[in-house]
Amino acid sequence: MAINDNFLRDLQERTDIEQLVGSYLDLKRRGKTLVGLCPFHNEKTPSFTVYPESNSFYCFGCGAGGDAITFIRRIENLDYIEAVKFVAQAAGMKMPEDGFDDTLSKKRGRILSANREAARFFHKTLYSEAGKEGLSYFAKRMLSKETIIHFGLGFAPDSWDSLRNHLKSLGFSDMELYEANLIKRSEKNGAVHWYDNFRKRVMFPIIDLRGNVVGFSGRVLDDSKPKYVNTADTLVYKKGNGIFAMNFAKNANDGKFILVEGQMDVITLHQAGFTNAIACLGTAFTQEQANLISRYADEVYICYDSDGAGQSATKKALAVLGSTGLRVRIVRLEGGKDADEIIKLYGKERFRALLEGAANKIEYDIIRERAKYNLSTDDGMMNFLNAAADILAAVGNIERDIYAARLANETGVSKEAILAKAVQRSAAVRKKAVERKRAQETRMLTDIKDKNNPEKEKNLRAARAEEIIIASLARNPDFYKKFKSDLTPDLFITAFNKRILTVLLQKLESENGVELSFFAAYFNPEEMDSITRIFRLGEEISNTPEEIGDCIETLKKEKSTVGIKASELSDEEFAKLFRKNKNTGW
């Protein structure tokens, strides 16, 4: 059972979404709304819009949307009940004594408990006969006992069921351990077999900012594959949000983080005194990780490996960090392939010198472009300066002037000529950005593809009619009585919109009104993106009973022609679906 609607309505009325969202990102007022750079995707032009009158948000860049609860769910990686508690606490409200189901929260608690006990098991095993290989590995990596204890490092024995048997003896069920991704399952001849996920690996526990063990990363002791086995996404852990050692580094960073590639780099740096080192978990650096970093620092030193893969990762990280407002510097690891090797070969003072000589993003981009061309030739020099002008076109006047002067001294080309080219390119860049944003906003509201409603593209006319009905009823609940006999979930064709209508009809029947926050209990944050977009359509349609009637008739007709693709519609038919019409909408 979801939290009762009356509490949610009171919570919405007492929640200042501008203040709540504004504590995570910078917002600027634009009429009745506020805009800022989206915390859920990389962008340079603000597309993230906050609507104080409805306590909601929507990003025209990536489609993220929802209410205050959904925002907290996404940015803090919480489940629904935990997010409601978070928002309620911020609003000075107490959770109701009854009227909500905390089953999911209890399940999360069990997973966290299982992870904590698993971490203790791995650490104890490291100092046993079964873990001597792991202890030898850490000794070769020159880690002290104090460092091993500090990070809670451990070893998963070469066994199929040691961890499972231990945790089951503590009262955990196979399903709980499976949901924690501590064990896996296979089926053979109708029988289910359970086995440990981590075997014969040194273990790195992943600890969140609250001190909870949320997952593990296990590394082999040789060159076998896969090199790492990591906890998959669970109720308590998403690899795209995880940052290794953030729980330690956030309290010792002096406004700066050193971003490295792997856990061993982090641990070696911490042991050497660089306790602000962190590593992002997962296959790629994400916007969620960048946003978390920006909450605890003003400056980031990217210190990725010096090989090709590391340089490619640096370029991608720069693109993601560019939307956070953080100052970024890039460390060139001269003399070693990674931070761990630099420390071991040359000592911490050498690494400190590399930090002090780190390039900022502008310098780094210019260095990369310079390496592409032969500056001893006229063509090479011209191509390099054109590329450099593009870099300077995207920065402020002061930075542009400084680097134009440096380039003039280096190349012999006048500073004025370099500035003129950069200014020329700057106008083109701004114009393109404005055009791209305008097209993007239009596309987000009219896109025929919907990640949550895959049936939409093949049932475009029906899906559009369904969305208008939902948007109109949400905006005008009093229309419901007129169409009550016609409006049933069976009327709808696409399954996702049918789910939305089912919840909507429940709320309309209760006569408690319709609020976006009422839906957050029934749909995950990604699904709330689409629901928020549909609700925003209420501003683009006629909002009349006649329009709903037309949509109902359209759906009845579409039942016999299900499967017509957008590509099969004429240009006029397609345009009509998305034409803003304040008369009938059809």
Image (cartoon, grey):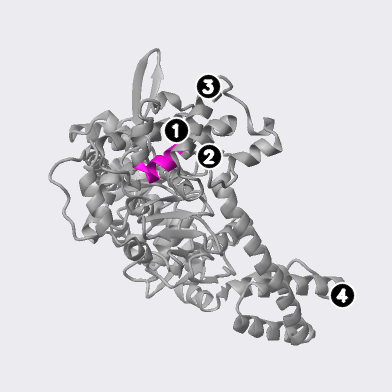
Direction left: furthest residue? 97
The residue indicated by pointer 4 is: 378
**Where 520 sits versus 439, above or below?**
above
- Mark 1 — residue? 496
Residue at mark 1 to residue at mark 4: CA–CA distance: 60 Å
User: Where does label 3 land, which residue?
Assistant: 559
Q: Amino acid at mark 1?
A: Phe
Q: Judge the density around disc 4: few (<14), some (14-19), many (≥20) Cα neighbours within 10 Å.
A: few
Q: Position of residue 213 (x, y in %)?
A: 29, 49
The verdict on residue 476 being magenta is yes
How far separated are the C-alphas under marks 3 and 1?
A: 16 Å
Packing grade of label 1 (10 A; few <14, some 14-19, many >=20) is some
Q: Does the CB distance between marks 1 and 2 fall below 8 Å?
A: yes
Amino acid marked by disc 2: Asp
To which residue does mark 2 refer?
A: 450
Label located before the other in sequence (2 or 3): 2
**Is there any visible trace of residue 85 in the rendered image?**
no
Mark 4 is on which residue type? Asp
Question: How many angstroms separate mark 2 from mark 4 (CA)?
Answer: 50 Å
> Marks 3 and 4, Cα distance to the nearest angstrom?
67 Å
Residue span colored magenta:
469-477
The reply, left or right, for residue 152 in relation to residue 74 is left
Residue occupying the point 55% across, 25% down:
558
14 or 414, which lies in front?
14
